[in-house]
């Protein structure tokens, strides 16, 4: 049996006045996913528990069959896994943005889209100044970097009640009430203050002043967590798996559950991604593993930008260039099951993730067809099968 999971990130939405009362999914031409509903079934699932933030990390954990309440430990540990950074059981990972703070306000959570080379140079200076047995700064891409706090004999004072604020939620706002709080916050504030002192007359910033660019005034630490303890997918569900994505969170999630990560040329994590290459990569990877999951960030990015036209176009491209060819290929391979589902809605109206239900479509061996014919929010509402605890869907899907 072969399995495919296709995740159009954030594609679920609300009815739009400008679309004559239709949602983007209802307005988009999606013959391929509609045929999955017609041959199979559809319904709703809830992937974000009430007490968790509707991030792609939480929602995708649930979509892949893991109860986020039991398994979610934070964003940074998943990004560390994506970069192949090993964490001990009591080590902590934190996201370490390079930011521009002016007059106690978050002017830029990207330090003016600082380059990877500049970030590497700034982080190298931090690594020279810290106790290397306890702290390791890891450069990532541009402003997205990591800090690992090694346990070093119980020296990390952070706890599950430590609170931090994502810097992208603070743009142009005062940061004074949003410094780290709770256990270990003194240490985090000290590390951020230390970075401000080191960056103040750093050659990278001197050059940026001369170029009229925003300065990297300090780090901003957030997204903290320990290594998640996740059973491998194969142990919990059976099939061996592979992930195709352009997003580090999903790479990290895949590695953490024992999946291979397949890199695809032209996969950008944006609306200009090479959809057809991702579709072809799914078909190719099915030769090597039982289950292939392909995640496409484009509809979510279009929603964050409030770009309805781009969102519909992304949905149609996923349908035509990924879902269609993959479904055809599966039919030639024998027994299969296919699942199409976003992780969470990203309504155009609010430009951010919501915790509401998402529609899903499933077809294949042993799936009894129902009368529904289309993939959209209102048809899924009519579906008989519902998963209020979204992570319980995987067991049913694998069968
Ligand atoms: Zn998402």
Image: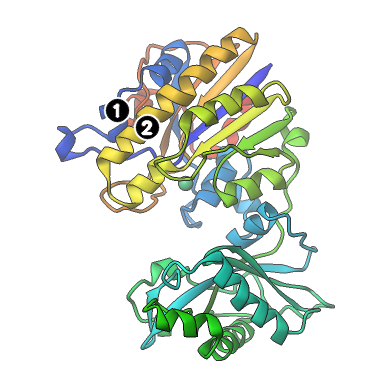
Mark 1 nearby-residue class (10 Å; few <14, some 14–19, many ≥20): some
Q: How far is disc 1 from disc 2 in space, using C-alphas? A: 7 Å
- In the image, 51 versus 30, the foreground residue is 30
Pinpoint residue 93: horizontal percent, then vertical percent.
67, 67
- In the image, 119 versus 311, the foreground residue is 119
Q: Is residue 243 left or right of residue 163?
A: right
- In the image, 230 versus 69, the foreground residue is 230
Pinpoint residue 324: horizontal percent, then vertical percent.
46, 18
Q: Is residue 181 left or right of residue 139?
A: left
285 relative to 117, above or below = above
Instruction: Assess whether mark 2 and mark 1 are in contact (beta carbons under 8 angstroms).
Output: yes
Labels in figure, total: 2
- In the image, 48 versus 171, the foreground residue is 171
> Image quarter for residue 319?
top left
Say which mark, if any, is on residue 315.
2
> Image quarter for residue 337?
top right
335 relative to 196, above or below = above
Q: Badge 1 is on which residue?
A: 28
**Residue occupying image coordinates x 40% and y 67%:** 169
Q: Secondary structure at mark 2?
A: helix
161 relative to 236, above or below = below
Q: Is residue 95 left or right of residue 261?
A: left
Pinpoint residue 234: horizontal percent, then vertical percent.
75, 33
**Residue occupying image coordinates x 56% and y 88%:** 193
> Image quarter for residue 8?
top left
Any atom of ligand 1 within 8 Å of the CB at mark 2? no
* Residue 10 visible in the snapshot: no
Mark 2 nearby-residue class (10 Å; few <14, some 14–19, many ≥20): many
Pinpoint residue 11: horizontal percent, then vertical percent.
38, 38
* Residue 121 visible in the snapshot: yes
């Amino acid at each position: 049996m072969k399995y495919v999971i296709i995740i159009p990130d954030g594609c679920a939405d609300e009815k739009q006045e400008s679309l004559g009362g239709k949602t983007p999914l209802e307005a988009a031409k999606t013959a391929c996913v509609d045929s999955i509903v017609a041959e199979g079934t559809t319904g709703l699932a809830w992937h974000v528990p009430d007490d968790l933030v509707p991030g792609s990390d939480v929602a995708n954990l649930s979509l892949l069959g893991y109860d986020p309440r039991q398994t979610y430990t934070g964003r940074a540990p998943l990004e560390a896994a994506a970069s192949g950074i090993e964490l001990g059981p009591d080590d902590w990972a934190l996201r370490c943005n390079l930011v521009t703070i002016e007059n106690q306000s978050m002017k830029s959570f990207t330090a003016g889209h600082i380059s990877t080379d500049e970030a590497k140079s700034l982080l190298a200076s931090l690594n020279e100044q810290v106790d290397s047995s306890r702290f390791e700064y890891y450069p990532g891409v541009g402003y997205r970097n990591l800090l690992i706090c090694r346990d070093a004999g119980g020296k990390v004072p952070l706890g599950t009640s430590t609170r931090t604020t994502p810097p992208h939620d603070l743009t142009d706002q005062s940061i004074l009430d949003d410094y780290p709080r709770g256990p270990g916050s003194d240490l985090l504030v000290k590390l951020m203050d230390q970075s401000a002192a080191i960056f103040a007359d750093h050659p990278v910033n001197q050059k940026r002043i001369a170029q009229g660019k925003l300065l990297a005034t300090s780090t901003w630490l957030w997204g903290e967590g320990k290594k998640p303890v996740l059973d491998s997918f194969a142990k919990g569900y059976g099939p061996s798996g592979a992930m195709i994505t352009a997003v580090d969170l999903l790479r990290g999630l895949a590695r953490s559950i024992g999946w291979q990560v397949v890199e695809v040329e032209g996969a950008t994590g944006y609306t200009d991604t090479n959809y057809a290459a991702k579709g072809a990569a799914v078909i190719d990877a099915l030769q090597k593993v039982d289950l292939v999951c392909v995640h496409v960030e484009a509809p979510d990015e279009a929603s964050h930008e409030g770009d309805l036209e781009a969102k519909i176009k992304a949905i149609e491209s996923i349908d035509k260039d990924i879902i269609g060819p993959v479904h055809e290929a599966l039919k030639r391979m024998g027994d299969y099951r296919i699942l199409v589902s976003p992780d969470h809605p990203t309504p155009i109206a609010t430009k951010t993730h919501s915790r509401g239900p998402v529609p899903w479509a499933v077809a294949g061996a042993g799936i009894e067809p129902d009368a529904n014919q289309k993939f959209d929010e209102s048809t899924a509402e009519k579906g008989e099968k519902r998963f209020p605890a979204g992570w319980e869907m995987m067991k049913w899907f694998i069968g």
